[in-house]
Amino acid sequence: MSQTFLGYRRPVGAAGVRNWVAVISIMDNCNPVTRAICEAVDGTIPVTTLFVRGQYGHDLEVSLNTLAGMGRNPNIAAVLLVGLEEGTTEEVARRIRPSGKPVEAVTLQPNGTINVIAEGTRKALKLALAASNLRREPCPVSDLLVGVECGGSDTTSGLTCNPTIGAMADRIIDAGGSVIISETSEFFGAEHLFAKRAVSDTVAKAFTEAVLRLEREAVGRGMDIRGTNPTPDNIRGGLTTIEEKALGAMAKAGTRSLAGVLTYGEPPKAKGLYFMDAPAPAVENLTAFAAAGCQLIFFGTGVGNPIGNMVSPTVKVCGNVNTLRTMADNIDFDASDILEKSAKASSLGEKLYSFAVDVASGTRTTSELLDVRETAISRFAPTI
Amino acid sequence: MPRAIVLNPQDNVATLIDTGEAGVACTLQGEADGTVTLRSAVPFGHKVCVRATPAGGDILKYGQVIGQASKNLEVGDHVHIHNVDSARGRGDKPGARS
């Protein structure tokens, strides 16, 4: 097994697996400019967002930290911020600067749309030219922080793609890297098993409390979560209850010890397997992974969910023979041999690890090439 | 013959990895062997009962509780949301675990 990949070394911290210039909207009203700049300059990616204007307190902190986290992500060579006004723009810029990478900004006030697109395009051009001078070089797999996700799950997920991702996750951790599993609601019914893997009672309690707190919130609202989670497509795929879904979802975390619990978008402070307390829906969960610094995401799917993350290449793993036929364009790795040829998840996990090294070294994913990528930062309070 | 997988010897359900028509015998794999005759059609990926379970009894998959039977289940029954209840996140149900 290769212990190195070909990555882009950064001034501070881990190496990247991509070398993009991120054009980041500071708030929703900046998105049209962000998109226009990215259409004009190759080598850039648009990191758009909704809201921010009118957010306050913890909710605003999460949004600003998440935008900055995506800018700090090792896959990003340089950042161009697109703001409405200077104050909030500088709030994000100062959170990215410790990464040591170039950070530029343009603001709509008082320049107006046409001028700011022109100014931003010139700045993005210079940043992209400079980024193109960087070259891939051998970097240790221990630099990798990998997010593990599932979406569009069905009963094949817990039998094929998730155990395959789990076997790969064990190998990443054994090579000195780190893995984050999240989707708090998708531990309802499996938390007692996962808590046993915590390195300490404190970690076990923090994890269990995160799961039970979310359940208390749903129950406190008088809600029945069935039909929302499991979703209608989960149910069509044979998943009957959230407990069944959770037991299958947990397989993607492999078997190593749970080192700690993270908040939304929070980077791990050490190596190993982490749990991030964050909402389960894919786009907002993947956004939290990218903000935490994940260079890669592995996404198990059953009935099929094509979406990927803008900053962190997202590898789609599927073991449902029907989906592999009907949604082949959206799948990167076939795990169906587990059901069709009695293959072991451990041997498919080894293949997926090799593929992870390939993707980290530049092999593209379907969600990147088809540009089926989206960004959404979770909201925790209303705007004012 | 459609295939169905039993994941743990304690499980009272098996997961079909083929489409099962009503009345056909389905081959059990994994932690059980033999066959189960389907009492109704079971779609790909859905579950079939492999051990009779009374209403209120636990449904076991992976050797873990995934819900409770809301009706008496016979061997060969399609086991899904029409005859299984979840105990989690049930704010609609007074006394549900919270």
Image (cartoon, coloured by chain):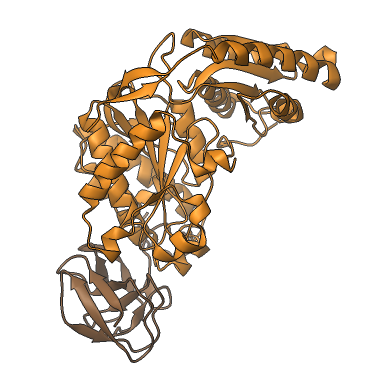
Chain colours: A orange, B brown
Of residues B86 and B8, the one drawn nearer to the viewer in this rendering: B8
Q: Is residue A324 above or below residue A7?
A: below
**Residue reaching furthest to the bottom:** B23
Of residues A354 and A56, the one drawn nearer to the viewer in this rendering: A354
Please state if A246 lies on the left or on the right of A130 as rendered.
left
Please state if B15 lies on the left or on the right of A185 as rendered.
left
Which quadrant is home to the C terminus of chain A? top right
Of residues A135 and A68, the one drawn nearer to the viewer in this rendering: A135
Q: Is residue A219 above or below residue A366?
A: below
Q: Is residue A251 visible?
A: no
Point out residue A269 in the picture as x, y percentages from the top left corner.
Answer: 33, 20
Q: Quadrant of residue B78?
A: bottom left
Point out residue A226 in the picture as x, y percentages from the top left corner.
Answer: 47, 62
Point out residue A102 in the picture as x, y percentages from the top left corner.
Answer: 56, 9
Q: Is residue A206 visible?
A: yes
Point out residue A237 in the picture as x, y percentages from the top left corner.
Answer: 44, 66
Q: Residue placed at 81% from the left, 15% from the top?
A: A109
Which quadrant is home to the N terminus of chain A? top left
Q: Residue placed at 43% from the left, 22% from the top?
A: A16
Q: Quadrant of residue A359?
A: top left
Q: Residue placed at 33% from the left, 51% from the top?
A: A162
Q: What is the tally of numbered marks visible in this picture?
A: 0
Q: Is residue A330 above or below residue A63?
A: below
